[in-house]
């Protein structure tokens, strides 16, 4: 049974990059907070957050974005008129609060939505960042992310992600089936990441963009949703002093986002928990009582990882 399980895991994880596939919509909650990623790393805003206005325009706090890009921001007031200037080595932008246009390198450009003051922060349309500061900017409607700059993803291979020896996770290894690579060799250790580290590349292949929990009304069940560049890789809940709880993807629920990413869905509760250390316990009913909050980590299983496992600190605890 152990060999069979490992074979299944390897086969599932070797599914190719996102293709056409069966598409099915899972019920989502309220719109997520708009986030800004600079060179694939999420920016932290101490107070006022980016948002999407009633017209659908993405508005970002210009000061924090500009300063992160090395530009200087100035403020002035003439009577009741408030003005904002952004200056970098190669570009100059002059704006007036309440107007829809700005002077970009001396040329007037209209952005169709007002430059506004909110929570004592100046918010500008996303396109102004691109045109005014000369940066590549994309709006990711799937993740509600603003991509600024390059898309060179950090990797779990990078030195900043330290390897923790496998013995430190002994309390989570009542069975070691899921801590072996596709060649049935024990991993050398585990690399722990956090939700704030996403998006991240696992090794040199799959990119994991996000992980969420939602309730699917059609299937009447709680699901874990993982946005990834790869379809079908399993996950597992790591529960202290208990068996690791493997979850295969619900392939029929897969959603192709049309941008070389897709949504993989996994059940929170599964009868597969009747398998404990490769032995099927027919009368075990505890599988129905599992809650995501019981897990300390979620294992991101990937057959392309040979030297270490990757686990994310449980964001739903």
Image: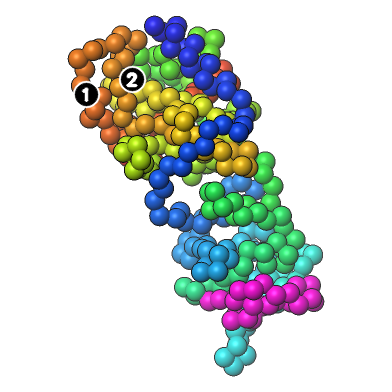
Q: Residue at x 21, y 23 (%)?
A: 286
Q: CA distance from mark 1 to mark 2?
A: 11 Å
Q: Is residue 100 above or below residue 224?
A: below
Q: Which residue is mark 2?
A: 272
Residue 80 placement (x, y as % from top left): 57, 91
Identify the residue at image location x=60%, y=70%.
Answer: 124
Q: Where in the figure is residue 7, as x and y percent of width and height?
A: 49, 11
Q: Is residue 106 magenta?
A: yes
Q: Tell whether position 265 is magenta.
A: no
Q: Is residue 43 above or below residue 133?
A: above
Disc with the residue nearer the chain's start (1 vs 2):
2
Where does the magenta region start and end? 95-117
Question: Is residue 81 something one can see in this rendering?
Answer: yes
**Residue, disc 1:** 286
**On the image, which quarter does residue 109 sit in?**
bottom right
Secondary structure of residue under mark 1: helix
Look at 44% across and 8% down and name the residue there: 4
- In depth, the one of 160 and 215 nearer the eye is 215
Q: Most extreme residue toward the bottom, as rendered? A: 79
> Does 192 sit above or below residue 99?
above
150 with respect to 266 (left or right):
right
How many numbered badges does the structure rendering display? Answer: 2
Question: Where's the N terminus, which quadrant?
Answer: top left
Q: Residues within 10 Å of mark 2 (few under 14, many from 20)?
A: some
Of residues 285 and 171, the one drawn nearer to the viewer in this rendering = 285
């Amino acid at each position: 049974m152990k060999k069979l399980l490992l074979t299944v895991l390897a086969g599932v994880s070797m599914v190719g990059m996102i293709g056409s596939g069966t598409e099915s919509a899972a019920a989502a909650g309220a719109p997520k907070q708009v986030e800004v990623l600079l060179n694939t790393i999420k920016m932290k805003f101490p107070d006022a957050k980016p948002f999407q206005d009633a017209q659908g325009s993405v508005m970002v706090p210009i000061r924090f974005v500009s300063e992160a890009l090395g530009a200087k921001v100035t403020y002035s007031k003439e009577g009741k008129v408030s003005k904002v200037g952004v200056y970098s080595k190669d570009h100059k932008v002059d704006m007036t609060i309440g107007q829809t246009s700005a002077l970009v390198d001396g040329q007037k450009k209209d952005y169709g939505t007002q430059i506004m003051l909110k929570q004592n922060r100046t918010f500008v349309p996303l396109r102004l960042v691109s045109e005014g500061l000369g940066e590549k900017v994309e709006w990711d409607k799937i993740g509600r992310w603003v991509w600024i700059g390059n898309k060179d993803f950090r990797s779990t291979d990078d030195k900043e992600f330290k390897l923790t020896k496998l013995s430190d996770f002994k309390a989570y290894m009542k069975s070691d089936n899921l801590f072996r690579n596709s060649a049935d060799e024990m991993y050398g250790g585990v690399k722990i990441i956090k939700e704030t580290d996403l998006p991240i590349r696992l090794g040199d292949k799959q990119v994991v963009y996000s992980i969420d929990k939602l309730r699917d009304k059609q299937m009447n069940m709680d699901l874990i949703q993982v946005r990834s560049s790869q379809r079908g890789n399993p996950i597992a809940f790591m529960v202290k002093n208990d068996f690791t709880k493997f979850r295969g993807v619900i392939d029929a629920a897969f959603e192709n986002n049309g941008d070389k990413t897709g949504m993989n869905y996994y059940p929170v509760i599964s009868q597969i928990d009747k398998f404990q250390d490769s032995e099927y316990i027919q009368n075990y009913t505890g599988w129905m009582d599992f809650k995501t909050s019981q897990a300390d980590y979620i294992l991101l299983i990937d057959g392309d990882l040979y030297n270490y496992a990757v686990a994310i600190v449980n964001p739903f605890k």
